[in-house]
Image (tube, helix red, strand yellow):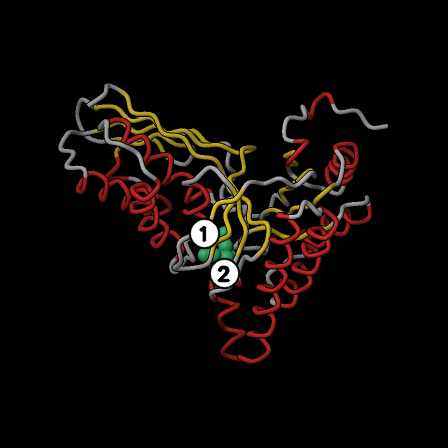
Amino acid sequence: MKEIGHGWASGKIILLGEHAVVYGEPAIAFPFLGAQITATVTKAAAESTIDCLYYTGALRKAPETLKSVRALLQLLTDELQITEAFQLTITSSVPAERGMGSSAAVAVAITRSFLDWQQLPETQERVLYFVDQAEKIAHGNPSGIDAATISGKQAILFTKGQPFASFQLNLDAVLIVADTGVKGQTRLAVKDVAHLFEQDATAAAQKIQRLGAVTQAGYQAMLNNQPAVLGYNLTAAQTLLQALNVSSQKLDTLIKTALAKGALGAKLTGGGRGGCMIALADTPQQAVVIRAALEKAGAAAVWLQGLGEYAHVSWESTSVH
Ligand code: MEV
């Protein structure tokens, strides 16, 4: 056993396919390095404690909001046969409930810290074994896309219950992520989509299947480095997500703003009803213009991630011409 175990995880962005992925359609997601979580674990003198943004104190008194973390810690200590008390510290820049997979990211960082502490080899399968169970407690019936994305290093094409395929993001474009500042409601949104199926199964299934087709078209566009085609499919997905009633006024406003400033496409990301939106720009200059417009339109935070040939652009120094 090491003295201190360290674990790390990033957030995630779903590019295409949220909600439809719950019904067996494919989705594309990738780890988002703009937001990160670290966890450290070490032996405690007396009882086990947890120190995070929401709570500091004895693990046994941790609030209901941390129930998936508590369950994960129980599972880790049982399965890794840890008998000593521990002190767990979590620091995070992944905004909670904003569609960035914060619950899966916390679970991945904690699991990695425990495996490191116990000097056990870390494989994605092993991490997923623990994280999938924590996600079921956090979200009810998750597709597993958050856990699969965050426990890996690359973009994935994910279909529920199937082995997922990683691929290289060779798209020459810039991804813009903007936070509405409003908590997303993934659990409720997933439930409401299920309700649409109860009301009119044919109409709901049609939208879900069209989302699947848009995801496939977007995937091909990514493989062929066609940012404009991908952008078109992002906006097409947003129209379908709106029809499923999982967008929100604030998301729609930010999406409209990005498109008006020349984004190739824009949509919500994650569960919706709040949380984050994404937009695609074909150059860093365009991305900076869109970022300024989103900030002016009320975004709580905006991140830029260069892809392909723009992967190493330093955003602070990008000037607008
Ligand atoms: C949440 O990040 C994505 C959803 O599709 C739900 C899920 O896949 O479990 C909305």
Mark 2 CB in 8 Å range of ligand 1?
yes
Q: Give how far across and how far down residue 275 sits, in percent.
A: 58, 48
The residue under label 1 is 145
- The mark found on residue 26 in the picture is none
At a point 53% along the width and 61% down the height, the residue shown is 19
Is tag 2's residue or tag 1's residue first in the polypeptide sequence?
2
- Residue 173 place in picture, x, y as percent: 70, 39
**Element class at badge 2:** helix
Q: Residue at x 37, y 34 (%)?
A: 109
* Residue 259 place in picture, x, y as percent: 78, 49
- Among all residues in the image, which is located at the extreme right? 321
Determine whether 47 is above or below 159 in the image.
above
Q: Quadrant of residue 39?
A: top left
Q: Rate crowding at label 2 as few (under 14), some (14 to 19) or many (20 or more) other CA atoms within 10 Å.
A: many
Residue bearing the label numbered 2: 21
When the figure is inspected, residue 96 is found, relative to residue 114, above or below; the finding is below
Give x and y (percent) for residue 49: 26, 31
Kind of residue at disc 1: Ile
Residue located 19% across and 38% down the image: 77
Q: Distance between the residues labelled 2 and 1?
A: 8 Å
**Kind of residue sitting beneath label 2:** Val
Q: Is mark 1 within 8 Å of ligand 1?
A: yes
Specify the quadrant of the image occupied by residue 285: top right
Q: Is mark 1 on a helix, strand or loop?
A: helix
